[in-house]
Image: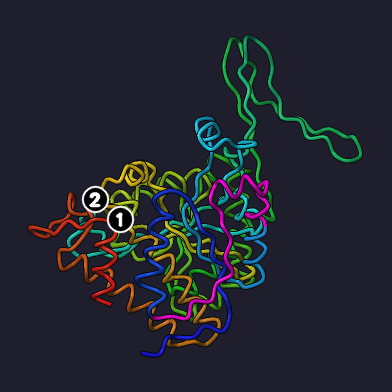
Amino acid sequence: MAKIKMTTPIVEMDGDEMTRILWKMIKENLLEPFIELNTEYYDLGLEHRNETNDQVTIDSANATKKYKVAVKCATITPNAARMEEYDLKEMWKSPNGTIRAILDGTVFRAPIVVKGIEPCVKNWKKPITIARHAYGDVYKGSEMKIPGAGKVELVYTAEDGSETRELVHNFAGAGIVQGMHNLNGSIESFARSCFSYALDTKQDLWFATKDTISKKYDHTFKDIFQEIYDAEYKEKFKTAGIEYFYTLIDDAVARVMKSEGGYIWACKNYDGDVMSDMVSSAFGSLAMMTSVLVSPEGYYEYEAAHGTVQRHYYKHLKGEETSTNSVATIFAWTGALRKRGEMDGNTELMAFADKLEKATIDTIEEGKMTKDLALITTIPNPTVLNSEAFIKAIAEKL
C-alpha cells in the first residue's frame, strides 16, 4: 500500500513522561505505517527545555507561525519538587503559556463522545466545546494581605504623570485585596478566534460574563465581542446558519445544564479553567478531551487536554504494566493532520484522520479499552487492555 504523502510539515512538539512513551507508540503503530510523516521536530521534554534555557519552546511556537499547524505532547510545568527531581537551572514557565502568548491564541476544549461512556448530565447528547480566554484576570493578578485599618485604592498614572484614583475599600481591620487586568487587544484576539472557530466548525457560539455587576471590566468583554461580531461576523454567521448568543454567566450555566450540547461556550479565563474541568468530568474523562489553540491569524496547535500521567510513568520505569488512555493524544494528531490536509488540499490526509478517529472510537465501542474507561463504561464485560495493546487494537481496526 502506497503511503500518504505530505507536502508541508506539521510542527511536532514532543513532551514528557508517560505521554512521551505513548507519543512514540502512536507514531510507530498508527501513523508511520500509513503516512510519509513530514514534521519539523522540537523536543519539549523538560531536560531539553532546561538545556536550551527554554529557547526550544520559543522556537517551536515561531515554527508554528511559519507552518500554521502544530501537534503537541503533554509537558511538565515544573514546581519545586520537579526542580529538584530534574536538577533544573530554574523553574521554567508552562510551555503552553509561552506558546499561547506567542501565538496570541484561544484554547478550545471538547469532549470525545463515545457510546458506552455516558455523560453524567443525561440530556447532553453532543459535545460542548469550551473556549477559554487564556490571558490575564486572576492569573496575572497582584495580591496583598492587609494587616489592619487603612485605605486601598486603584491608581492609574498616565504617561504625562496625571493620576486617576478609584477607592477599592476603606478597611476597618485586616483583610485581603487583589488587582487584576486585561488588554483590549487580547480580548479582541479572543473574540476573533471564537467567531472564526465557530464558522470553521459550524457551531453556535455562546459568550457569558457578569457585566451587570462588573460594569467596566466584564462589560468591556461584552462590548468588544458585540462590536467585532456586528462589524466582521454577523453576515458570515447568517450565511452559515449559526448563532452568536450572549447572556450572563449564571444564566449560561443554567442553560448549559438543560441543553443537548453541540455549541461553543466562550469563557473568561477563570470561568474557562473551571468549566472545562466540569464539562470533561461530566462527559466521562479528561483523557477523552481534545484541545486546540487557535490564533486569529490562522495558526492551530493541537494537544491532549490532560497532563503527563506521572503516576503511570513511574510504574512504567519500574517495569510494571500500565493501562494509560491515549485517545486524546491520538485525536491531537488527527486534528493536526486533518487541518494540514485542509490547508494543503490533501483529501487523502483528511480522510486518514477521519478513519483513525473512527477506528479509535469503534475499538472502545466494541468493548476494548483502557482501565480508566472500563471503570465508567456501561458496556458489559469490557476487555481491559494495557497502554500498548490498546494502541495495537486500534491499529488492527484501522
Which quadrant does the C terminus fall into? bottom left
Q: Is residue 151 magenta?
A: no
Question: Which segment did they paint magenta?
Answer: 34-58
Mark 2 in CB contact with mark 1 (< 8 angstroms): yes
Looking at this view, name the residue that lies furthest to the front.
319
Which of the 4 image quadrants contains residue 222? bottom right
Q: Position of residue 91 (x, y in %)?
A: 60, 36
Seen at 37% across and 45% down, the residue is: 313
Q: Is residue 233 left or right of residue 364?
A: right
Identify which amino acid the numbered label 2 is placed on: Asp
- Specify which label sits upstream in the sequence, 2 or 1: 1
Identify which amino acid the numbered label 1 is placed on: Asn
- Front-most of 280 and 330? 330
Q: Position of residue 256 (x, y in %)?
A: 34, 54
Seen at 28% across and 73% down, the residue is: 395
Residue 372: give its label: 2
Q: Position of residue 9 (x, y in %)?
A: 57, 76
Q: Is residue 124 positioned above or below 146 on the image?
A: below
SS state under label 1: loop
Looking at this view, name the residue that lies furthest to the left.
380
Residue 325: give its label: 1
